[in-house]
Amino acid sequence: MAAAIIVGWVIGSGTEIHQAAVAVLFAFLAGGIVLNVLKEELPEEQESRFWAFALGAIGYAILLLAV
């Protein structure tokens, strides 16, 4: 697993990925994060607070767009 990081870095340094492909991969990753939060982190009962989740999602989106 640790070697995969180094191999990925070498491949990434030697190749150039089109900006549209990076956007698609980034959107796929962000969607996976959102689905994981919805599935695993939020309580199944009515114990959750939507506004706390929405505020966190908006803050995370602003952070991603700022970078």
Image (cartoon, grey):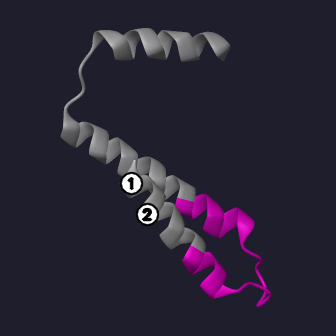
Residue 59 is a magenta residue: no
Residue 3 position in % (x across, y down): 61, 9
Secondary structure of residue under mark 2: helix
Residue 34 position in % (x across, y down): 54, 62
Please give the name of the residue rendered at 43% of the width and 54% of the height, measured from the top-left corner: 64
Horizontal relation, residue 30 to residue 25: left or right? right
Please give the name of the residue rendered at 56% of the width and 17% of the height, measured from the top-left corner: 5
Please give the name of the residue rendered at 42% of the width and 8% of the height, measured from the top-left corner: 10
Q: Which residue is mark 1?
A: 66
Residue 48 is a magenta residue: yes
Q: Main secondary structure of the magenta part?
A: helix
Q: What's the distance in space between the residues labelled 2 and 1, CA to CA?
A: 6 Å
Q: Which residue is mark 2?
A: 62
Q: Amino acid at mark 2?
A: Ile
Q: Nearer the viewer, residue 67 or 48?
A: 67
Task: Please tell me whether residue 20 is drawn above or below residue 52 in the rendered image.
Answer: above
Residue 33 position in % (x across, y down): 55, 55
Q: Residues within 10 Å of mark 2 (few under 14, many from 20)?
A: few
Q: Are marks 2 and 1 in contact (CB under 8 Å)?
A: yes
Q: Amino acid at mark 1?
A: Ala
Which residues make up the magenta segment? 34-55
How many numbered marks have been drawn onto this rendered protein structure?
A: 2
Task: Please tell me whether residue 41 is drawn above or below residue 33 in the rendered image.
Answer: below
Quadrant in which the N terminus appears: top right
